[in-house]
Image (spheres, grey):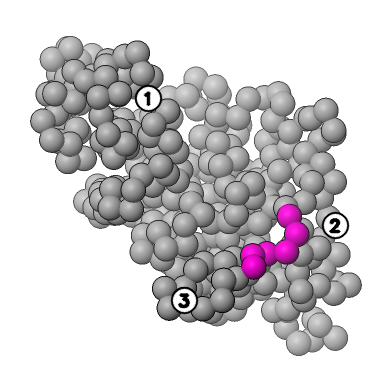
Amino acid sequence: MTVSGPNKGGPVLRVDDLRVAFSTFDGVADVLSGVDLEVHPGQRVGLVGESGCGKSVTMRAIMGILASPPARVRGRITFAGEELLTMGRAQRQALKGTAMSMVFQDPMTALNPVFRIGEQLTDVVRWADRRRGLRRTASERRARILEVLGQVRLPDPERIFDAYPVQLSGGMRQRVLIAMALLNRPRFLIADEPGTALDVTTQDEILRLLNELVRDEGLALLMITHNLGVVREMTDYVYVMYAGNVVEHGTTDAIFAAPAHPYTRALFACVPKLSGGRAYAGIEGTLPDYTRPPEGCRFHPRCPHAEARCFERPPSFDLGEQHHSACWLHAPTEAKS
């Protein structure tokens, strides 16, 4: 299927029919089964779904950090017009940490506890310099690191540079991870659950910081999260994933105004309401066994609207400008008859 975000320019990242399988003792697990998405320059894109639906595997496939074997990756991943899956290893490695970067999920464990912050950030800059053929002095690298630590609003960058991770709070560590991702001025940034393990106030500060960086630096941002409140506030475009498939995608306004796919509606219904009322029981059933996934739509064993046609894989139906749903409920009338 062809997808597009609200930006009419060419995408910085395009994923077509991405498939990832893992060899396990129980057989081959087809974790991703035809994922398509796009991210445009200056755009904030959310990838949402319950735990285990394939969000982080998608991110790791894009970044090229899935071990092969056991992972087998097929499809197309195009970054700035270049095909990543057929790219040489050295060229692919050169992109990571330079043109594309990521903020890891858990700030409490992502930093090495036995090295100072400055040592870890210096390694990142030195590695990128070597890939780019640049020669900078130690003082020039230090100046760049202190500049970025200030950019992410860490107080007293000199002190942070010389500190160990254990001497920093969770929010400060998260800012260090963002600084690490920004050191080499990437064009594309993946944020994997950037608010994990942080209190709500600190999480809000981190999300505001990411928002400002997209606005001021022109970054393209792909945010992976299960927090729908964050998605509503932080993104322009949303992809909803279930069991390795994108089941619905569209502008954030369109998705939240009228969620269309039964899975999207069930996911939204799980969010507690501030007005109170009866707590939603959740979505019946569990994610499928990826070594023996259901035929057709993978959600049909849990779907209250399932019918015979759901055993066929549905295409993406256009529900209006910038809104698509992969569900037979939205097939044109003549296709249903």
Quadrant of the frame with the N terminus: bottom right
Q: Is residue 125 above or below residue 187?
A: above
**Which residue was labeled with disc 1?**
111
Check residue 276 in the rendering and tell me which mark sits there, or answer none: 3
* Tag 3 secondary structure: loop
Q: Is residue 252 above or below residue 44?
A: below
Q: Residue at x 86, y 64 (%)?
A: 311
- 132 or 203: nearer the eye? 203
Work out how far the residue at label 3 is from the one at label 2, CA to CA, in angstroms: 38 Å
State which mark lies toward you, 3 or 2: 3
* Tag 2 secondary structure: loop
* Tag 1 secondary structure: loop
Find residue 19 and report its image quarter: top right
Segment colored magenta: 281-286
Find residue 110 and report its image quarter: top left
- Residue 161 lies left or right of residue 218; in this view the side is left
Q: Amino acid at mark 3?
A: Gly
**Which residue was labeled with disc 2?**
295
Find residue 72 and report its image quarter: top right
Q: Answer yes or no: do the residues labelled 3 and 2 have beta carbons within 8 Å? A: no
Give the percent coordinates (x, y) of residue 226: 51, 54
- 196 or 44: nearer the eye? 196
Which residue is the extreme one toward the right?
Answer: 308
Q: Is residue 285 above or below residue 119?
A: below
Q: Callout 1: few (<14), some (14-19), or many (20+) C-alpha neighbours within 10 Å? A: many
